[in-house]
Image (cartoon, helix red, strand yellow):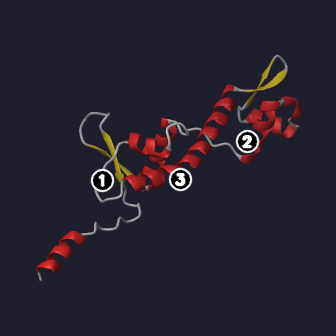
């Protein structure tokens, strides 16, 4: 797996995206030694590796923003113990126009890694993967049995 960008590399790549002539010698050295900057016809350009690193870093930042909304929507949908849902219901609850399917799925996978959500595969079909509360999710209040209690009280 690729190394995450340092804050210095992020700043230098942001400058390089606008104009590589603004880079300091130290920034050029740091980016070039990491393989994020290349030379093309005597000019410095952001390499393919650098472009992929920027794209990956932007994607991770976007997922971090979406993750809070996904967690809230998932825990609202999975409001009872043993409740199951598909990713599409969570995606629609978060807002399909605002977030892509991949962003929501990646946020759900991160929540799964943290133990807040959990995957359940009920069959060998990959299209039948369900999500449920994980062991680290906040506890669900037990269902209220007010109807049974009211009937017992009325019988007495």
Q: Count the labels in the image.
A: 3
Badge 3 local density, few (<14 within 10 Å), some, or many (20+)?
A: some
Q: Are marks 1 and 2 in contact (CB under 8 Å)?
A: no
* Pointer 1 residue: 83
Q: Residue at x 82, y 35 (%)?
A: 28
Q: Residue at x 49, y 42 (%)?
A: 104
Picture coordinates of residue 102, whole percent (x, y): 49, 36
Picture coordinates of residue 111, whole percent (x, y): 46, 51
Between 65 and 96, which is closer to the camera in this rendering?
A: 96
N-term mark: 3 or 1? 3
* Pointer 2 residue: 10
N-term mark: 1 or 2? 2
Q: Residue at x 24, y 71 (%)?
A: 146
Quarter placement of the N terminus: top right
Badge 2 local density, few (<14 within 10 Å), some, or many (20+)?
A: some
N-term mark: 2 or 3? 2
Between 145 and 111, which is closer to the camera in this rendering?
A: 145
Residue 68: numbered disc: 3
Give the alpha-carbon distance from disc 1 to disc 2, as whole Å.
Answer: 42 Å
């Amino acid at each position: 797996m690729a190394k995450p960008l340092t804050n210095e590399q992020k700043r230098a790549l942001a400058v390089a995206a606008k104009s590589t002539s603004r880079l300091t010698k130290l920034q050029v050295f740091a980016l070039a030694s990491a393989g994020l900057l290349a030379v093309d016809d005597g000019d410095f350009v952001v390499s393919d590796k650098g472009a992929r690193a920027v794209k990956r870093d932007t994607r991770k930042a976007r997922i971090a923003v979406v993750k809070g909304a996904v967690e809230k929507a998932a825990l609202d949908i999975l409001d009872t113990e043993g409740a199951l849902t598909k990713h599409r219901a969570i995606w629609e609850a978060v807002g399909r126009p605002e977030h892509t399917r991949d962003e929501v799925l990646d946020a759900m996978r991160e929540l799964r890694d943290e133990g807040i959500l959990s995957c359940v595969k009920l069959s060998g079909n990959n299209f039948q993967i369900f999500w449920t509360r994980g062991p680290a999710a906040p506890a669900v209040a037990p269902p209220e049995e007010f109807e049974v209690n009211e009937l017992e009280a009325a019988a007495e």
